[in-house]
Amino acid sequence: MTGSIVLFGPPGAGKGTQASIIVDLTGKPQISTGDMLRSSVSKGTELGLEAKTYMESGKLVPDQVIIGLIEQRLEQSDASGGVLFDGFPRTIPQAEALEKITNVSAVISIEVPDDDIVSRIVGRRMDPETGEIFHVSFKPAPTEIQGRLIQRKDDTEETVRNRLAAYHEQTKPLGDWYGERGLLIPVDGSGTIEEVGNSVEAAVKSL
Ligand code: ADP
Ligand code: ADP
């Protein structure tokens, strides 16, 4: 399959956690706009400075900033056979811009109720050395690396509420938009990491 795959879902649904299954099965590189933005913020670039306030308050970064980032990334040679988008697009204008530059073959939507989202996000921890995502209860890190784990600044209960509001207002309608185009594959994201992984694997194999 030469087209791109979109991994869609609310913040904290498990997109980053499940992305590696799709990368392993398809060989497509993962493009996470959240990771790209965090890297710009930590480097202190102009784009990072602009994005930072939005990210810290749980609002979406303006479409034009995101579309510019994606246009540049898709020019790299590893993107020519399609990619796995993680956390992008998040608005209908982003999806419309994407339509003009790449072919989306499928949108795998990880569906998780809001009540589960808060506990997933507040307990999320990341290993800065490997990028691996853990959870204090649902995926505890090995004891020897626990001391170096970091918590994202926007992973607080207050910010999660804003991120969920942004999701319901701006991102969820995009799921319906892809549904109307026959591209949406819903996956139940409320089970364990392993159970969701099995469903994601089955969805990719059905393509
Ligand atoms: P996203 O990329 O969609 O924001 P993550 O993959 O970072 O989500 O997952 C958010 C948090 O929830 C992480 O701490 C992760 O370990 C945990 N998590 C992911 N999937 C599940 C699951 N099915 N059950 C419980 N916790 C999960
Ligand atoms: P999560 O999936 O856990 O919400 P991300 O790492 O995908 O986290 O995104 C973190 C923040 O980066 C978002 O809250 C938002 O401010 C910004 N962001 C990431 N991707 C996009 C996007 N496609 N459009 C607008 N803002 C984005």
Image: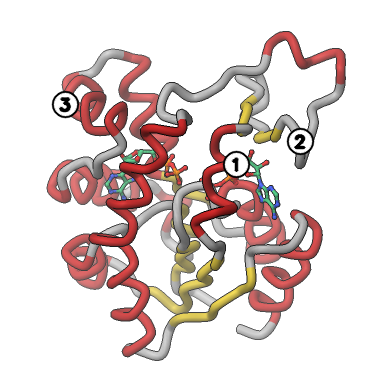
Q: Which one is in front in this view, the residue at disc 1 or the one at disc 3?
A: 1
The residue at 86%/23% (across/down) is 142
Q: Which label number is shown at residue 119? A: 1
Alpha carbon distance from label 1 to label 3: 29 Å
Depth order, front residue of 126/23: 126
Q: Which one is in front in this view, the residue at disc 2 or the one at disc 3?
A: 2
| 48 is higher (above) or lower (below) than 103 | above
Depth order, front residue of 55/138: 138
View extreme (right): residue: 143
Alpha carbon distance from label 1 to label 2: 9 Å
User: If the image is split into quadrants, where does the C terminus sit?
Assistant: bottom right
In the drawing, does residue 92 fall left or right of residue 84?
Answer: left
Q: Residues within 10 Å of mark 1 (few under 14, many from 20)?
A: some
| 5 is higher (above) or lower (below) than 62 | below
Q: Earlier in the sequence, mark 1 or mark 3?
A: 3
In terms of image quadrants, where is residue 189? bottom right
Depth order, front residue of 72/154: 154
- Any atom of ligand 1 within 8 Å of the CB at mark 2? no
What SS does tag 2 mark? loop
The residue at 33%/88% (across/down) is 181
- Ligand 2 is found in the corner quadrant, namely top left
Depth order, front residue of 20/138: 138
Kind of residue indicated by mark 1: Ser
In terms of image quadrants, where is residue 98? bottom left
Q: Residues within 10 Å of mark 3 (few under 14, many from 20)?
A: some
Kind of residue indicated by mark 2: Ser
What SS does tag 1 mark? helix
In the drawing, does residue 186 fall left or right of residue 191?
Answer: left
Q: Which residue is mark 2?
A: 137
